[in-house]
Image: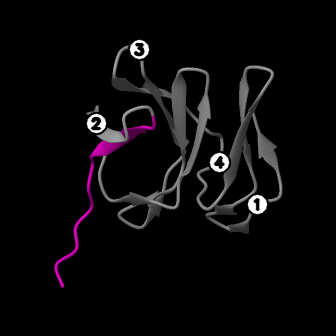
Amino acid sequence: MNQRSLTAVTCFNPQNSKWFPLASLPFYDREFFSVISAGDNIYLSGGTESGVMVADVWCYMSLLDNWNLMSRMTVPRCRHNSLVYDGKLYTIGGLGVSGNLDHVER
């Protein structure tokens, strides 16, 4: 079976039951990342790319239909959770280069 990563992002509109394309992801072969929405934006943090943990945080700005690199977390991580509280993005736990992470980044 042939497998390959996709960079396509699509959005479902429940009002008309249709899917439509959004700006493609600015990377490929990324997995085990965290995604959270806040207001009109979507934040994607960490994960692994080609098997290497990454620390970057990307923001999809729906009004502009583009992805922007926001910043990097202090610790590369994957399989973590994220949340937005009081206008700030938090990443929680997950796996780091040296094992399980038990701290929160803001």
Kind of residue sitting beneath label 4? Val
Q: Of the residues under marks 3 and 2, which one precedes in the sequence?
A: 2
- Tell me what residue is drawn at x 61 percent, y 21 percent: 39
- Tell me what residue is drawn at x 67 percent, y 56 percent: 80
Say which of marks 2 and 4 sits in front: 2
Query: In this view of the protein, can residue 25 be seen by the observer?
Result: no
**Residue that label 1 marks:** 101
Q: Of the residues under marks 2 and 1, which one precedes in the sequence?
A: 2
Q: Is residue 32 above or below residue 7?
A: below
> Percent x, y for residue 56?
51, 40
Residue 3: image quadrant is: bottom left
**Residue that label 2 marks:** 20
- Tell me what residue is drawn at x 27 percent, y 61 percent: 5
Q: Main secondary structure of the magenta part?
A: loop
Mark 4–mark 1 CB contact (< 8 Å): yes
Kind of residue sitting beneath label 3? Leu
Q: Secondary structure at mark 2?
A: strand
**Callout 4 crowding tier (Cα within 10 Å): few <14, some 14–19, many ≥20:** some
Say which quadrant the C terminus sits in.
top right
Mark 4–mark 3 CB contact (< 8 Å): no
Q: Secondary structure at mark 3?
A: loop
Say which quadrant the N terminus sits in.
bottom left
**Residue that label 4 marks:** 75
Q: Of the residues under marks 4 and 3, which one precedes in the sequence?
A: 3
Q: CA distance from mark 1 to mark 3?
A: 34 Å
> Percent x, y for residue 72?
56, 35
Kind of residue sitting beneath label 2? Phe
Q: What stretch of residues is rendered in magenta?
A: 1-14
